[in-house]
Amino acid sequence: MKIAITGSDGFVGSHLISLLKHHTKVEIVCLDLSNGIDVCDWDQIKHIQVDLVIHLANKSYVPDSYQDPTSFYKVNVMGTLNMLELARMNQARFIYFSSYVYGHPQYLPIDEQHPIAAFNPYATTKVMCEEMCRGYARDFKVPVAIFRPFNIYGKGQNLLFLLPLMANQIKEDAKIQIRDDRPKRDYIHISDVVRAVEFMSFCEWPSLFEIYNLGTGISYSVKEVAQMLIQYSGNSIEYLASGEQRPNEVLDTIANINKLENLGWKPEVSIEEGLKDLLR
């Protein structure tokens, strides 16, 4: 099987490559800027022949989406459109990596039927891309599986994200200094995320178009995570929370993962194991 992976040099992509390289009958085609390939440029990719497209490449740091929305819309939307078209031309399956797109939860845990509410420019691009995926499945019979990951964390993640930031603060400064420690999130370890992608790459799909939440079904507050990190560090760590609150903050998210579990996948890494791994 020949698999094209966009964003293969990113956080999720690099972990996925490490996992898939153990499959001896798989040929991986890495599509990313580090290899000189811009998936937003159709002429650079139109010749590629594949059986499966795994589309991970996108701009994802939410604050940047307010500063440079044009780039977010161009990269996220055009890149997805081109890769969908490549899948159509090859009669290939398509796995799309979306995001948390539910806004303020109307109920918990959140299942895939929960209303969508894009609440920042980044999330808006994801909703647009999901609709393109739905359209290609409906109109051109491209098999599509969409993942909606909740809060991914793990080694190699950009320090702009909260959990690696706090782990790094402990290592470098023997302190944790954050703003609002109230919000609760469903944190899923990167190894469970890439196992889900691996599972979907080789399993039989139940239908032409499906959406799957990726999470654990448990949420932890920022304060709880910070306390665990301090405990596992085994050192005396100063903890400071300014209490500064972001506007329109979502205070709790919990994923209902029954749909993916019923298909045969389940998370294996506990928050305790994942945080200890961050500190190593």
Image (cartoon, rainbow, N blue to C red):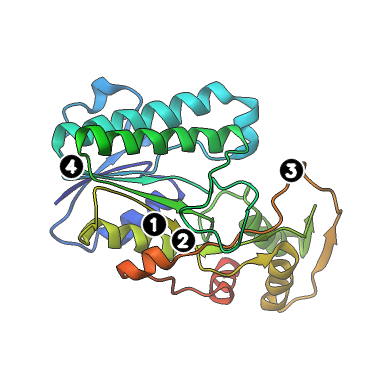
Q: How far across and down, in percent of the image, does residue 26 sit?
A: 17, 55
The answer for how far apart the CA atoms under marks 4 and 2 are is 26 Å
- Name the quarter where the C terminus is drawn: bottom right
Secondary structure, mark 2, is helix
Q: How far across and down, in percent of the image, does residue 112 sit?
A: 46, 54
Residue at the disc numbered 2? 190
Secondary structure, mark 4, is loop
One can see residue 258 in this view: yes
The answer for how far apart the CA atoms under marks 3 and 1 are is 32 Å
Q: Residue at x 25, y 24 (%)?
A: 44
Query: Left of 63 or right of it: where is 148?
Result: left
Residue at the disc numbered 3? 248
Q: Point out the frontmost of discs 2 and 3.
A: 3
Residue at the disc numbered 4? 92
Query: Left of 53 or right of it: where is 187?
Result: right
Mark before the other along the chain sequence, 3 or 1: 1
As drawn, the label of residue 157 is: none
Q: Point out the frontmost of discs 4 and 3.
A: 3
Q: Are marks 1 and 4 in contact (CB under 8 Å)?
A: no
